[in-house]
Amino acid sequence: MQFLEMINYIYRDEYLKHLCTYLGKTPNLWQRMTLVLEEMSAKQNVNKHVYMDCNEHQQDYNANQLTIYDSLSQMCSVLHEEDLWTGLWMEYAQYPETNVAICYEQMGSFKEAQGAYDLAMSKFKDDLSSGPCNTNMISEVMLWEQHWIRCAKELN
């Protein structure tokens, strides 16, 4: 445990997120790494008011928060914690269609979920063609793709 405390003390947050995700896949370290990521997320939320004063720092804050959420999301997926994963995505999904699709999928309505993922993907495609859009969408786009395929497999 002292090793983990040392890592937490030495590494800066930008490296620690990825290190926690990697180490968290180890059977005996998943709980501690999840707690470290949750602590980092809580610390980001406390510091949120500092970043709100200046618009240029707002983008840095959002990108940093999204990488923490991505790491937590990966940890929840690896641990098969579907409810925690769903709650996490409900908080930080940028398209409301993502939340709808996840809810349908959670309830077992895979046809409706697949339709909601289609709608989210087409809306994102329209946003891309109409001009600049948010660049922090990679994880959400990957979610749409992976879960659309999952819904297709469930529907046969």
Image (spheres, grey):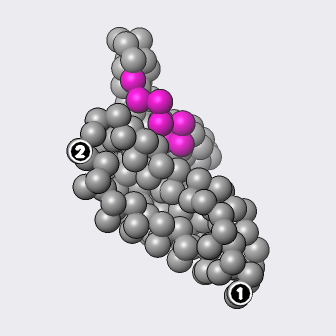
Query: How many C-alpha atoms fall within 10 Å of the one at disc 1: few (<14), some, or many (≥20)?
Result: few
Q: Amino acid at mark 1?
A: Gln
Q: Which image quadrant is residue 152 in? A: top right
Quadrant for the N terminus in the image: bottom right
Residue in the picture at 59% in, 48% down:
150
Q: Residue furthest top?
A: 130
User: Residue 47: image x %, image y %?
Assistant: 33, 60
- Residue 152 shows in this picture: no
Separation of residues labelled 2 and 1 (CA atoms): 37 Å
Q: Nearer the viewer, residue 42 or 11?
A: 11
Residue at image location 29% in from the left, 53% down from the top: 50
Residue in front for this viewpoint, 150 or 77 = 77
Look at the image and tell me whether residue 20 can be seen: yes
Q: How many marks on residues?
A: 2
Circle 1 residue: 2
Q: Residue at x 41, y 12 (%)?
A: 129
Amino acid on which disc 2 is placed: Asp
Q: Earlier in the sequence, mark 2 or mark 1?
A: 1
Vertical comparison of 115 with 151: above or below: above
Label 1: which secondary element: helix
Q: Say if the magenta span includes residue 23.
A: no
Report which quarter residue 78 is drawn in. Answer: bottom right
Query: Which region of the structure is painted magenta?
Result: 133-140
Which residue is the site of mark 2? 53
What is the x, y in percent for residue 81?
A: 54, 71
